[in-house]
Image (cartoon, rainbow, N blue to C red):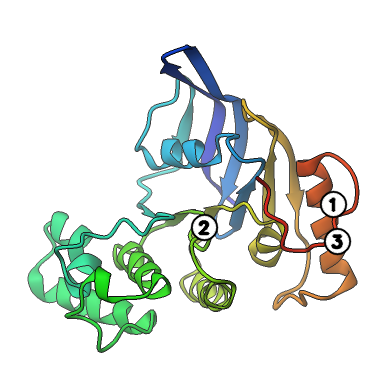
Amino acid sequence: MDELIKIQGVSKTFEIETGNLSALEAVSFEVLKGEFLCLIGPSGCGKSTLLRIIAGLMEPSEGGIIRTGDLKLAMVFQNFALFPWMNIEQNVGFGLTMQGMPKKEVAERVKAEIARMGLTGFEDKHPKELSGGMRQRVGIARALAVNPDILLMDEPFSALDAFTAEKLRADLLKIWHEKKMTVVMVTHLVDEAVELSDRVVVFSPRPGKVKEVIKVDLPRPRKLRSQAFYHHSDRLKKLVVGSGRLTNRETLLS
């Protein structure tokens, strides 16, 4: 697989009242074309910070991001980040409108992504009228509408109930397969990473460093109650938590 992005020695330090806070230290790995890559690690280890650096929303203190060609990136946020004064149709089409795309093409693209995410009939609704799961569907539809080469996702399911999150994960995998795009996702759930990923980048506690990159070589669709799945899950949990076998397979890494 070809490299789309190379993260090279990225460090990030924030100035706070008590001095400097080192969030990331000398982080290096690559993002491969067409893969589903998850970033996981203890709370506060800089995963979301790194995702924002990859997206170009934040500058690293040291190191850099090397992109192969003119890549189009889109981001899905944990808190949905929708415009409350816009209806669903306007929210989904916002990025396309900002790019100066003709109105007819915007309307066609928006209609297609709204249908893909199961939002048909809700075009005139506003975010406050929707459930959390529906709002995240809008966020994903907005990101997909720009037809990105790489979809960046920052804990997109963490604010949702377990049933809604499960359904959205299945939908995401279907879309990823259909569009053959690259996904980089931050998660705090080990089982979620094993279910979705081709590879998992495991971070150390702050300042975040790459502890290990794990290849998840399980066939798809994955059997979430299989011994092979539990093996990968336990291996990741030991890396993140430190030691010991965890029996609760949905343990939050906080």
Comparing 124 with 131, the one in front is 131
Question: Farthest residue toward the left?
Answer: 103
Reading the image, the residue beneath label 1 is 235
The answer for how far apart the CA atoms under marks 3 and 2 are is 29 Å
Q: Quadrant of the C terminus?
A: top right
Identify the residue at image location x=65%, y=63%.
192
Q: Quadrant of the N terminus?
A: bottom right
- Tell which tag, 1 or 3, sits nearer the viewer: 3
Q: Are marks 1 and 2 in contact (CB under 8 Å)?
A: no
- Residue 183 disc label: 2
Comparing 90 with 133, the one in front is 133
Q: Amino acid at mark 3?
A: Thr
**Earlier along the polypeptide chain: callout 1 or callout 3?**
1
- Tell which tag, 1 or 2, sits nearer the viewer: 1
Q: Position of residue 154 (x, y in %)?
A: 48, 51
Question: Farthest residue toward the bottom?
Answer: 121
The answer for how far apart the CA atoms under marks 1 and 2 are is 22 Å
Q: Amino acid at mark 1?
A: Arg
Q: Under tag 3, what secondary structure?
A: loop
Reading the image, the residue beneath label 3 is 247
Q: Under tag 1, what secondary structure?
A: helix
- Judge from the rendering whether residue 9 lies leftward or rightward of residue 252; answer left or right: left
Q: Amino acid at mark 2?
A: Val
In the image, residue 118 above or below residue 45: below
